[in-house]
Amino acid sequence: MKEFLFAPMEGVTLAGYRAIHHRMFPGAVEYYTPFIAPDSNGSFRPKYLRELTADCGTLTVVPQLLVNRADAFCATAEKLCELGFREINLNAGCPSGTVFSKHKGAGMLLDLASLDAVLDGIYSHAGRIGYRVSIKTRMGVRSTEEFPAILEVYRKYPVSRLIVHARCREDYYRGEPDRTGFAAAVRGCPFPVVYNGDVRSAEDLAWLGSAAPQVDSVMIGRAAVANPALFRYLQTGEQLRLEELTAFHDELTETWLASGLSPVFTVERMKTLWTFMQELFPEAKREVKAVLKAKTMPDYRIAVGALFRSGSFRP
C-alpha cells in the first residue's frame, strides 16, 4: 500500500482546510503547506506563522519554502525548528511565471551549478542544526529529458524525500506526465522518492507499483482537492458521497467565516475550491457557472444549494 501525501495548493490547503479534511477524510500521512516566501533574513509574514501553528499536534504538517538562496532558507529553517518542525521542504518545482522569472521554484533548475551551491549551503546547515530537508522538483525546464542531470545534483545530498512532479516546467499541468522517464531515472536512487502527477485511480497506482516498485509514496494535489475522499477511494474503493461533500463544504465555509474572513473573501476562497470540485458535477454546467459567478454570500449559498440538488453528482 502506498503512503499518500497531500500536495500544497495555494489558496486552498490552508490550516482550516487541512484540519477539516484530515478529520473527515483521513488517509494522507502528511500535508505540505502552500509555499512560504521569506526574505533574506528568514522573516515572513505573521499570517504564515498563524497558518503553520494552527494545526500543529493534530496532523503532520511540512512547511514548504520558496527561496533561491541558502542563507534565506537556513535563517527561516532555524525559526521553524524553534516551532518544532523537523522536516522542511524546498520548492524547486513551481512553474508560475512570476516565480520562475526570479529563479525560484522551477527557475532553480535553469542553472544546475547554482542549484548545487544552494543545496550545499542548505544541507550543511541542516546537518549542524539537526533537521531534514526534502525537495519538490520538476523533471526539467523545457524537457523531462533534463532530469538525469538534475538528479545527479540531488544525489550528492542526504535528501529526506525527493518529490518529483513528472512534467517539465513548460508543461505546467498540461498533457500526460512522463511516467516512463520518471521510472527509469529514479531507479537506484539513494533516498526515498515520491511520485507526483495525475494519480486518480487504482490503475495509476498499479502502473507505478509495476514500473517503479521502490517508490512507496505518492503526492496528490489537484485531484485530491477535486475529490476530498480520493485517498480513501484509492485505499478502500469507497466513493465520496454527496452528503459527505455537503457536510465538508458547509463546515469549511463556516470555518472561514468564523476565522474573521469577510463573507466576500470567503466566497472567493470557496470559488477557488470549486474550480477543482466542479469535476464532481460534470452535467451541471449551468449550476457550476452560477456558483463561480456569485459575488455575495447569499447568492453563493443559493447557487451551491442548487448545485447540490441538481442530481448531477458523479464522484
Image: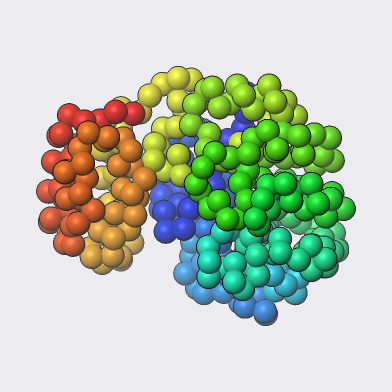
Residue ID at (13%, 55%):
299
Question: Residue 96: percent from the left, percent from the top?
Answer: 53, 62
Q: Quadrant of the N terminus?
A: top right
Residue ID at (30%, 42%):
278
Based on the displayed image, in which of its 4 quarters is residue 217 positioned?
A: top right
Pick the residue in front: 194 or 5: 194
> Does residue 269 lie above or below 7 as drawn?
below
Residue ID at (79%, 46%):
148
The answer to whether residue 65 shows anywhere in this view is no
Question: Residue 225: percent from the left, percent from the top?
Answer: 42, 43
Pick the residue in front: 138 or 192: 138
Left or right of 268 in this view: 225: right
The answer to whether residue 198 shows anywhere in this view is yes
In this picture the colour scheme is rainbow
Numbered marks: total: 0
Question: Residue 272: percent from the left, percent from the top?
Answer: 34, 54
Based on the displayed image, in which of its 4 quarters is residue 106 positioned?
A: bottom right
Pick the residue in front: 101 or 257: 101
Left or right of 33 in this view: 272: left
> Does residue 45 lie above or below 275 as drawn?
below
Question: Residue 115: percent from the left, percent from the top?
Answer: 77, 64
Residue ID at (33%, 61%):
259
Q: Quadrant of the C terminus?
A: top left
Left or right of 277 in this view: 313: left
